[in-house]
Amino acid sequence: MKYNASVLTKDYFIAYIKLIMNSREYTLMQDKEFAFDFFFKGDMDRYGTSTWLQFEKAIKEMDKIKCEIELC
């Protein structure tokens, strides 16, 4: 079953990612895998393409922020 009622935003996913990373002490890669399995139930289209794209944007932004902090 796919849900397309509303598109979740990049900011929503950034908050979600930060929460998971802090509460579970996950790396960004571990968080992405967890979110894919737990939130999306292994189906990137579960909430529609637009929501998936917002999730991907959030991951990229979090990666960029992490890289700036660590001076990649």
Image (cartoon, rainbow, N blue to C red):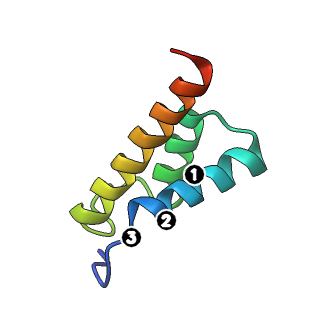
Looking at the picture, tell me which residue is in the foreground, 35 or 28.
28
For disc 2, the neighbor class at 10 Å (few under 14, some 14 to 19, many from 20) is few
Q: Residue at x 52, y 52 (%)?
A: 35
Which amino acid lies under the numbered mark 3 shown in the image of this protein? Leu
Helix, strand, or loop for circle 3?
loop
The image shows residue 14, relative to residue 5, as above or below, that is above
Q: CA distance from mark 3 to mark 1?
A: 13 Å
Task: Mark yes or no: residue 40 visible.
Answer: no
Q: Residue shown at 67%/45% (left/top)?
A: 21
Which residue has dot 2 on it? Answer: 12
Mark 3 touches mark 2? (CB < 8 Å)? yes
In the picture of the structure, the residue carrying the numbered disc 3 is 8
Residue drawn at point x = 22 percent, y = 61 percent? 49
Rendered position, 47 above or below 43: below
Residue 3's quadrant in the figure? bottom left
Q: Answer with left or right where residue 44 lies relative to residue 36.
A: left
How many other residues sit within 10 Å of disc 1, few (<14), some (14-19) or many (≥20)? many
Q: Position of residue 15 (x, y in %)?
A: 58, 59
Write down the quadrant of residue 53 in the picture: bottom left
> Which residue lies under the disc numbered 1?
17
Instruction: Give the residue type at disc 2.
Output: Tyr
Looking at the rendered structure, the number of numbered marks drawn on it comes to 3
The Cα–Cα distance between marks 1 and 2, rounded to whole angstroms, is: 9 Å
Asked if the residue under mark 1 is in contact with the one under mark 3, i.e. CB atoms within 8 Å, the reply is no
* Gap between marks 3 and 2 measured at Cα: 6 Å
Q: Residue furthest top?
A: 72
**Residue 65 drawn at (x, y percent):** 52, 35
Q: Is residue 64 left or right of residue 22?
A: left
> Going 52% across and 24% down the picture, which residue do you hit?
67
The first of marks 1 and 2 along the sequence is 2
- Give the class, few, some or many, for how many residues have Cα within 10 Å of label 3's Cα (few <14, many ≥20): some
